[in-house]
């Protein structure tokens, strides 16, 4: 029975510990994806901003000693593992701030922890890891402020949003929720002037830092993302495909929380729900519209998940009055999905399918680096970061890989390196053209 706070936190800490232990095993069982190896390189070359994302993840990875980062993929994935560990209790706190019961808040936290995004995002290291922690923290502070908390919670929430922008640009979308919180307390009048000014400064400082970063050679993250619109091509299937993928990442039953966040009556009577809704729908709408013209990755919409699971906790309260079935089904379904995701990515479940899906990115790079390095090829140049990053990580001490820009090599390659894994249905091939003291390389077909 969940009778008091102490029982709740025992369950939270125990669940978080078990989930983190399983994730550590998974993190050590699969290799770094190209994106992860790319982010690892940020930590070895710290900057005010990077070409496609703000710098926070690089700064965090820079704190991990190179000696640890070279010994195991687990160390590189520490930011993601820590994010997953923190998000479990933070999701519970957010649900409670939204006035959900203890039991429903726990179930919603478990559901979020064990959905597909909760599993993958807590192991595969991306800028989403610090973004999600800071976003959820900012949302908790905003909801508490909207419900009558101290006015100084407003600049604290803004500071979390500003820091979230240093993790990933979608952090800006949290401002809509903070604005809803501010609107709910407008009766305070002049007493909000000082907190509002402090909030503006808390947001402006990180954004100014990003602007300074864009003065570095090459486009900064904002300009890089805007440049993608120049190659936009309208797509009818983009928005529905994105929404379907978002449902797959969150889970079918938790999407019921979105219904509550769309209820005009609930929003008028609950400042907390208004903040959650303004943190949910603008994000979903922005990425759905973007999916109509550019390729949008489903995980971009994950910033809307904290609000979604808080809404799901409130829906659970209503459903539990009629029985335990939906609540139990949601948690059980997500447990099963979590186990399947882990086993498939590790190559233990239907291994021959690994080479045909997203899990392919988590295998084969160490073996490929060994094959390439065994021929002592000299300097390797490529314009494919998806190739340069993992070869650089797994070939340290044996491979000198440089990311360059230039024309596509032509003619027959002077060298071909290949690895095959029949069990995983995996094949990787690198073609090399002789260039100076080494090779210009690209991924083979």
Image: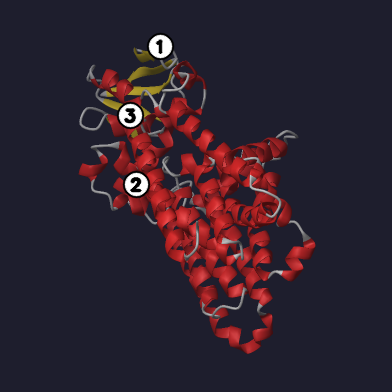
Q: Residue tagged by mark 3? A: 391
The residue furthest bottom is 190
Which label sits in the foreground, 3 or 2? Answer: 2
Mark 2, secondary structure of its residue: helix
- Residue at 40 percent of width and 57 percent of height: 10
Mark 1, secondary structure of its residue: loop
Instruction: Compare residues 171 and 392 and report the one nearer the observer.
Output: 171
Find the distance from the CA under tag 1 to the CA under tag 3.
21 Å
Is residue 326 something one can see in this rendering? yes
Instruction: Compare residues 223 and 370 and report the one nearer the observer.
Output: 370
Q: Earlier in the sequence, mark 2 or mark 1?
A: 2
Q: Residue tagged by mark 2? A: 78
Q: Earlier in the sequence, mark 1 or mark 3?
A: 3
Spot occupied by residue 118 in the image (x, y as percentages of width and height): 50, 44
State whether residue 299 is above or below residue 272.
above
Q: Earlier in the sequence, mark 3 or mark 2?
A: 2
Which label sits in the foreground, 1 or 3? Answer: 1
Find the distance from the CA under tag 3 to the CA under tag 2.
21 Å
Find the distance from the CA under tag 2 to the CA under tag 1.
31 Å
- Residue at 32 percent of width and 42 percent of height: 76
Q: Residue tagged by mark 1? A: 422
């Amino acid at each position: 029975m969940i009778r008091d706070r102490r029982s709740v936190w025992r369950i939270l800490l125990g669940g978080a510990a078990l989930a983190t232990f399983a994730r550590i095993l998974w993190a050590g069982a699969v290799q770094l994806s190209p994106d992860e190896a790319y982010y690892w390189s940020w930590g070895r070359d710290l900057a005010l901003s990077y070409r496609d994302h703000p710098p926070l993840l690089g700064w965090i990875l820079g704190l991990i000693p190179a000696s640890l980062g070279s010994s195991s993929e687990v160390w590189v994935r520490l930011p993601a593992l820590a994010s997953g560990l923190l998000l479990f209790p933070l999701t519970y706190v957010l649900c409670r701030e939204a006035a959900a019961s203890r039991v429903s808040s726990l179930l919603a936290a478990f559901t979020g922890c064990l959905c597909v995004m909760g599993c993958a995002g807590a192991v595969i290291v991306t800028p989403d890891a610090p973004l999600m922690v800071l976003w959820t923290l900012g949302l908790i502070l905003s909801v508490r402020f909207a419900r009558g908390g101290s006015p100084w919670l407003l600049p604290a929430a803004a500071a979390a949003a500003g820091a979230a922008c240093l993790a990933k640009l979608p952090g800006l979308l949290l401002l809509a929720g903070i604005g809803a919180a501010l609107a709910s307390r407008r009766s305070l009048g002049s007493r909000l002037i000082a907190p509002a000014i402090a909030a503006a400064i808390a947001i402006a400082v990180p954004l100014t830092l990003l602007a300074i970063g864009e003065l570095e050679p090459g486009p900064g993250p904002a300009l890089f993302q805007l440049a993608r619109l120049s190659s936009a091509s309208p797509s009818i299937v983009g928005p529905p495909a994105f929404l379907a993928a978002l449902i797959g990442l969150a889970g079918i039953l938790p999407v019921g929380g979105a219904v509550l966040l769309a209820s005009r009556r609930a929003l008028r009577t609950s400042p907390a729900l208004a903040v959650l809704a303004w943190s949910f729908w603008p994000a979903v709408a922005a990425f759905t519209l973007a999916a109509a013209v550019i390729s949008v990755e489903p995980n971009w919409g994950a910033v809307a998940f904290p609000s979604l699971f808080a809404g799901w906790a409130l829906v659970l309260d209503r459903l539990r009055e009629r029985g335990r079935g939906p609540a139990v089904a949601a948690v059980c379904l997500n447990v099963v999905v979590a186990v399947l995701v882990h086993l498939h990515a590790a190559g233990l479940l239907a291994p021959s399918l690994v080479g045909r899906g997203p899990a392919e990115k988590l295998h084969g790079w160490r073996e490929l680096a060994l094959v390439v390095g065994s021929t002592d090829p000299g300097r390797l140049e490529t314009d494919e970061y998806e190739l340069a990053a993992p070869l650089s990580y797994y070939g340290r001490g044996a491979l000198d890989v440089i990311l360059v820009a230039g024309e596509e090599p032509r003619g027959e390659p002077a060298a071909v390196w290949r690895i095959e894994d029949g069990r995983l249905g995996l094949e990787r091939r690198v073609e090399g053209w002789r260039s100076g003291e080494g090779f210009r390389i690209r991924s083979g077909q």
